[in-house]
Amino acid sequence: MIDLRERGWVKSISGREGGFILGKHPSQITMGDVVRHFDSILAPIDCVSETHYRACTQEGVCKFRRVLLDIRNYTTARMDEATLEKVAAGPIVTMKDVFRDSFIDGSGI
């Protein structure tokens, strides 16, 4: 929490009833900010990461890399537009959101 306080994301409140509250309005903190802070990376693999790039021996011929780069770009854009305010106001994920109808209750497996 000290690190989050130093970033200005939270403020500490002292005393018996103390704790932490957001230090910025939820519209000013994105999921991209949070994930980058805690995980340092949004890319699915190192060879498409801007901050943790590591070369792969197959870069010159790999066709999957384009798909993973597109995934990184899409994920980054979505995470950077998803503020804490929007996330808190959004709907809860249901099993129907996660699984296709044919997989719910074990059917189709």
Image (cartoon, rainbow, N blue to C red):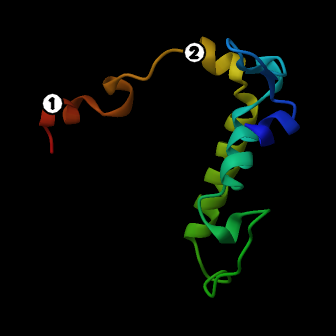
For the residue pair 34 and 19, the one nearer the viewer reads as 19
Question: Any mark on residue 90, and which?
Answer: 2
Q: Is residue 83 above or below residue 37?
A: above
Residue at the front extreme, as displayed? 16
Residue depicted at 82% across the width and 33% down the height: 5
Q: Secondary structure at mark 1?
A: helix
Q: Is residue 41 above or below residue 28?
A: below
Neighbours of disc 2 within 10 Å: few (<14), some (14-19), many (20+): few
Q: Which residue bears the numbered disc 1?
A: 105
- Residue situated in front as seen by the camera: 24 or 76: 24
Residue 3: image quadrant is top right
Give the farthest residue toward the left.
107
Q: Residue at x 75, y 31 (%)?
A: 30
What residue lies at 65% left-to-right and 57% top-to-bottom? 43
Q: Quadrant of residue 56?
A: bottom right
Question: Can you say which quadrant of the picture contains the C terminus?
Answer: top left
Q: Give the alpha-carbon distance from disc 1 to disc 2, as whole Å.
A: 26 Å
Left or right relative to 46: residue 2: right
Query: Hey, which quadrant is residue 85 in on the image?
Result: top right
As shown in the figure, which amino acid type bears the numbered disc 2?
Answer: Gly
Q: Which mark is residue 34?
A: none
Count of numbered labels shown in the rendering: 2
Of mark 1 and mark 2, the one earlier in the sequence is 2
Residue 4 or residue 65, whichever sits in front: 4
Q: Amino acid at mark 1?
A: Asp
> Residue 27: x, y in percent?
79, 19
